[in-house]
Image: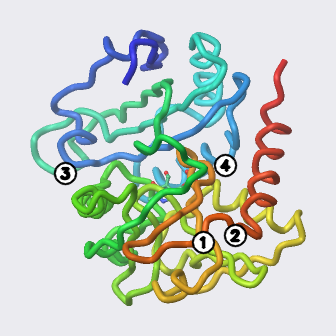
């Protein structure tokens, strides 16, 4: 949170510190709601349509009827970015079930609440991202789709937060979560990739992860650079045997991993990450051109 942060809420834009929600909001009481994190560069939102569509899918999955059309949300984002003092930043688009009674039943909530925050973002508390981040494999397993589908970007992040708390306790920068079968799923707020012998690999959606928009951009960027990509189940041992490992996310963009628990990757040896990173940055530059 910084003093420049702005919030669009029900059609008005105000300093984010002055915006407030009801203590009866089920988003607050039960994590009943959905959200998106987006980035803007040169005052243009990166992958706006994909984020709006995923918000709609998440809302549909929990039976939440958005009170605004996706076009209206895109207009609200445009106005918020125009009012924001910086050219680049982060947006948090949140739709809650809205205020209701203290019971869990969503039928007591008469109107969903939507708000959008524009703020600066510091993803991880790391001084030099290019040196890579460290991961800790959490004991907390990623929730199976039968319990709460990880493809729904809901306000209920306690599963991920518990994993992050474990990582914090070990001093690692981020948690790596496995699914109940012991396969790698994702980080607490990012997707994971490895490269081995010229091939890019990432876990398939069926292994319990959010269908990351950055993940998709990276797969496309790799394809355009002639790098084959496989969506394949991975064990921690596959990660330890890899040449490179990196995380992707709207907040993270593309961050190399230098270490997973005791295992260290050879940092000077980065065969594919630079080309993938270039493709990713080119995509941002072409979609969010200045002017
Ligand atoms: C659990 C989880 N996985 C992956 C991601 C990366 O998704 P995206 O690239 O769409 O930001 C996020 C980011 O929001 C996340 O919270």
Task: Locate residue 192, reporting x and y percent.
Answer: 55, 67
Residue at the spot 71% in from the left edge and 67% down from the top edge = 270
Using the numbered discs, state the Cα–Cα distance from disc 1 to disc 2 in whole angstroms: 6 Å
Mark 3 or 1: in front is 1
Label 2, secondary structure: give it: loop
- Upstream in the sequence, badge 4 or badge 2? 4
Label 3 vs 1, first from the N-terminus: 3
Is ligand 1 closer than 8 angstroms to the Cβ of mark 3? no
Whole-angstrom CA distance, mark 3 to mark 2, is: 54 Å
The label nearer to you, 4 versus 2, is 2
How crowded pointer 3 is (Cα within 10 Å; few <14, some 14-19, many 20+) is rated as few
How crowded pointer 2 is (Cα within 10 Å; few <14, some 14-19, many 20+) is rated as: few
Q: Which residue is mark 4?
A: 50
User: Which residue lies at the image location 35% right of the left edge and 39% below the top edge?
Assistant: 96
> Where does residue 231 sit, x and y in percent of width and height?
66, 80
Q: N-terminal of the two: label 3 or label 2?
A: 3
Q: Nearer the viewer, mark 3 or mark 2?
A: 2
- Residue under label 1: 266
Q: Please name which of the two marks, 3 or 4, marks the residue nearer to the observer.
A: 4
Distance from mark 4 CB to nearest ligand 1 atom below 8 Å: yes
């Amino acid at each position: 949170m910084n003093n420049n942060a702005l919030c669009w809420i029900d059609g008005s834009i105000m300093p984010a510190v002055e915006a407030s929600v009801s203590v009866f909001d089920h988003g607050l009481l039960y994590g009943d709601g959905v959200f998106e994190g987006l980035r803007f560069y040169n005052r243009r939102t990166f992958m706006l349509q994909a984020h709006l569509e995923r918000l709609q899918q998440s809302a549909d999955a929990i039976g939440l009827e958005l009170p605004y059309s996706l076009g209206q949300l895109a207009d609200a984002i445009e106005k918020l970015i125009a009012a924001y003092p910086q050219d680049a930043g982060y947006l948090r688009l949140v739709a809650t079930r809205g205020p209701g009674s203290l019971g869990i039943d969503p039928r007591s909530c008469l109107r969903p609440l939507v708000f959008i925050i524009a703020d600066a973002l510091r993803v991880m508390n790391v001084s030099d991202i290019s040196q890579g981040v460290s991961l800790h494999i959490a004991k907390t397993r990623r929730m199976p789709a039968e319990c709460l589908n990880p493809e729904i970007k809901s306000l209920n992040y306690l599963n991920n937060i518990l994993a992050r708390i474990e990582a914090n306790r070990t001093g690692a920068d981020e948690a790596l979560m496995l699914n109940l079968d012991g396969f790698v799923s994702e980080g607490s707020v990012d997707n994971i990739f490895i490269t081995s012998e010229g091939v890019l690999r990432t876990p398939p959606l069926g292994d319990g992860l959010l269908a990351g928009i950055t993940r998709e951009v990276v797969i496309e960027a790799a394809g355009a650079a002639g790098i084959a990509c496989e969506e394949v189940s991975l064990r921690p041992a596959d990660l330890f045997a890899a040449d490179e490992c990196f995380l992707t996310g709207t907040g993270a963009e593309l961050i190399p991993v230098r270490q997973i628990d005791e295992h260290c990757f050879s940092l000077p040896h980065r065969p594919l990450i630079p080309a993938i990173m270039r493709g990713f940055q080119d995509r941002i530059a072409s979609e969010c051109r200045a002017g």
